[in-house]
Amino acid sequence: MDSTGSFWLPPQSSTMAGEVDALFNFILYVSTVFFAIVVFGVVFFGLRYRRRGKTGLTTSKDHNLFLEIAWTAIPTVLIVIVFFWGFKDYMRMVVTPAYATEVKVTGQKWFWTFDYPEGANAVNELVVPVNQPVKLLMSSTDVIHSFFVPSFRIKMDVLPNRYSMSWFEATREGEYDLYCTEFCGKGHSEMIGSVKVVSDSAYAAWLEASTVFGEGLTLEEYGEQLYTTKACVTCHTLDGKKLEGPTFLGRFGSEIRMSDGSSVLMDENYMRESILNPKAKVADGYQPVMPTFQGILKDRQVDALIAYIKKINQN
Amino acid sequence: MSDITHDSYLSSPKGIKSWLLTVDHKRIGIMYFVAIMFFFALAGLLAVILRTELLSPDRVLMDADTYNQFFTLHGAIMIFLFIIPSIPAALGNFVLPLMIGAKDVAFPRLNLASWYIYVAGALIAVFSILQGGVDTGWTFYTPYSTGTNTAVISMTTGVFILGFSSIFTGLNFIVTIHKLRAPGMTWFKMPLMVWGLYATAVIQVLATPVLGITVALLIVERLMGIGIFDPAMGGDPVLYQHFFWFYSHPAVYIMILPGMGIISELIATFSHRRIFGYKAIAYSSLGIALMSFLVWGHHMFTSGQSELAAMLFSFITFFVGIPSGIKIFNWLTTMYKGQISFKTPMLYAISFLVLFTVGGLTGIFLGALSVDIHLHDTYFVVAHFHYVMMGGTVMALLGGIHYWWPKMFGRMYSELWARVACAFVFVGFNMTFFTQFVMGSQGMPRRYYQYGEQFARMHGFSSIGAYVLGFGFLIMFVYLIASLFKGRRVGANPWGSLTMEWETASPPIAHNFDTDKVLEHGPYDYDRIEVTPEDEKGKVTA
């Protein structure tokens, strides 16, 4: 198990990675040999048969059945090996173990949501137990996205109106990059999350904590946590900078111009509506790209976010 | 250029009107050449701007929307306006009738029409810039392309129209090759460039209509809200991918096959030797053309197509690589016991051999199902594609330009500067794109405006490579233009080649040949016909 990665490949952190890399390396070695033959041939013939002085008649040898068969048959044998090897591992990738934990993955512009059977949910951070297979049941609410974790060597498109599936079994605790790899618009390169692989006991603790909604925290503290974990941070800044969505700074309590020319007072009700039904009123200068958080956020979480935004505006 | 002594196609008749209404395949070829090189320069400039943006993980020049429009434009212009028409319509138009001893193509007026259709399609496509640009990527994947409020319609309408130009050229070449060969030129006495153009033309005629249908359906969906691909209207977005790649995979062979034709000519001429494995090379072109229709699903291993489909497409994909391998080995063996000259066209042919081999071998990684799951939609794919298309087709095109330049204009460029430029192009290309293989296999996704810090050094190196590459093209532009005015005059056959286009004056007369051509020897009979390259003074060295 390669925990640091190599020149070519990132660290191996799933049961699949070792097998994929073995084939990658096999193709790399065979290719290097073929490449060396071609380069050697060009250099050797180039030096040996370099034109010196005048041209004259040259050899009539222009075919050789043995050579033609050789350079057809040898590569054919090699690619058939590569095909079966790749196919064998691919079948392991697409057949999910029956006892896998199932997580529902939703891709949308431009964040990931993970729903657990226990009722917990998370945004942009998939928490999973180490050494246990996890099945991902995935769909999109808008355009096509693609779920890619390089360290696990898995990737699968996430489509609207259809489920796609993938699975992995993480072999090392740690945090791994999760990318969207199907172009999905302005925030495509920001649609990144992480997979956090934890021990069994830490996973159980996380599941419990995620189903009690910020107990032991003040509303404002809980809101601050949600601002990052529910991915508000992807599109809304706290420092006045404009991203896909308006900044949270300096707007609470003021009149805001809407794209239809009207203006709205930014109060608690407006914020609640903007979270749960964001297309109802769209601020001037922005596209109606925010998805609804209806069903993702519980009432207490909406309360906490509103409390947090108010706090930012007091400072 | 006015001191050309004979009545060349360039000098008579005179006047801009005589060019715009010409039905001479050579003039149409030159007109294509000018238009295509303009778009190559434009899309190349976009590439340099994109690489500049990628110098740093965060914003350098532009915001995400602009970046997305720039990479879409770079891809769409390079593919539809440059590389698909490049070799067949520009060089092919010029040399095909000359190579088979004909006076023109079979349908000269259709040939001119296809140029005007190309220009119309190209203008409509680039008109999308004035409408605010397109941000879908050159693949126009649905449902993103159905929903985005950018100028998808004018871009795809342009692509639709360009398709007709491509079909007309293909049709014209098929008929020309069947009907207008000089007496005595049987199928297996045709130069291999003609085989390459023939295989290309077959794909152009058979595959391009599917692209037309696909973009037409996309336009209908956007304009009339008829749900074909968009699931919100009951359509299937994966269906779009099937349609799109059913054209666009064969299209990569439209791009590479004529390049392979050029390479066969260059290696035989500059090795001064019979081409090795003529029939193997000719048949493998047809084999590639036929198999190219059966592998489109390898673009879709992660798309949600069935596992059975993925398995079949992977299996067939591997076999489309075999004919390309056969060609490489036959070209290599052609150098054995030759008399090899390293003039600029040969340097590009050798660049092709090296770079296309890398492009082909990296295709094996992507054809293997399990490995492709990891590499799909990363920079590895970007690098593979550029090694095949730029390391392959563009190197062949540059080799062809430098090879036929004296035939086209009757003058020679500076050999020294041409070698310098070739070195810059070769080094810059590898710096830019080899780095991207490593980035990709390390997990860097394509079409990313921002990227993680761990990729910063490789992105920086790749961008510097792009500047080196761009500088090479600048040098080339300067010495090629300069050669038109100051280049040394050349005779009919500067390289000492045995194909027919070298039997007429440089530049050729309007009707190509003084007499009706009859085949007197095969295109590669260097074992029985004495032919010698001209020396620096333009005299034949005896």
Image (spheres, rainbow, N blue to C red):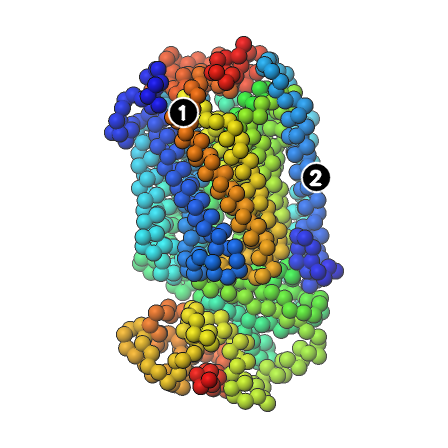
Number of residues whose C-alpha sits closer than 10 Å to that of mark 2, classed few (under 14), some (14–19) or many (20 or more): few
Judge from the rendering whether residue B231 lies leftward or rightward of residue B334; answer left or right.
left
Relative to A124, does residue A218 appear above or below in the rendering?
A: below
- Any mark on residue B319, and which? none
| Image location of residue A297, percent across then percent down | 49, 80
| Structural distance between the alpha carbons of marks 1 and 2 | 46 Å
The residue lying at 59 percent from left, 55 percent from top is B457
The answer to whether residue B440 shows anywhere in this view is: no
Residue type at numbered disc 1: Lys
Residue type at numbered disc 2: Val
- Quadrant of residue A55 within the rendered picture: top right
The residue lying at 53 percent from left, 50 percent from top is B463
Task: Identify the chain of the residue marked 1, using the numbered disc in the image.
Answer: B
- Quadrant of residue B529 within the rendered picture: top right
The answer to whether residue A265 shows anywhere in this view is: yes
- Please give the residue where the numbered disc 2 appears in the rendered image: A33
The residue lying at 62 percent from left, 73 percent from top is A127
| Image location of residue A152, percent across then percent down | 65, 62
| Image location of residue B142, percent across then percent down | 43, 57
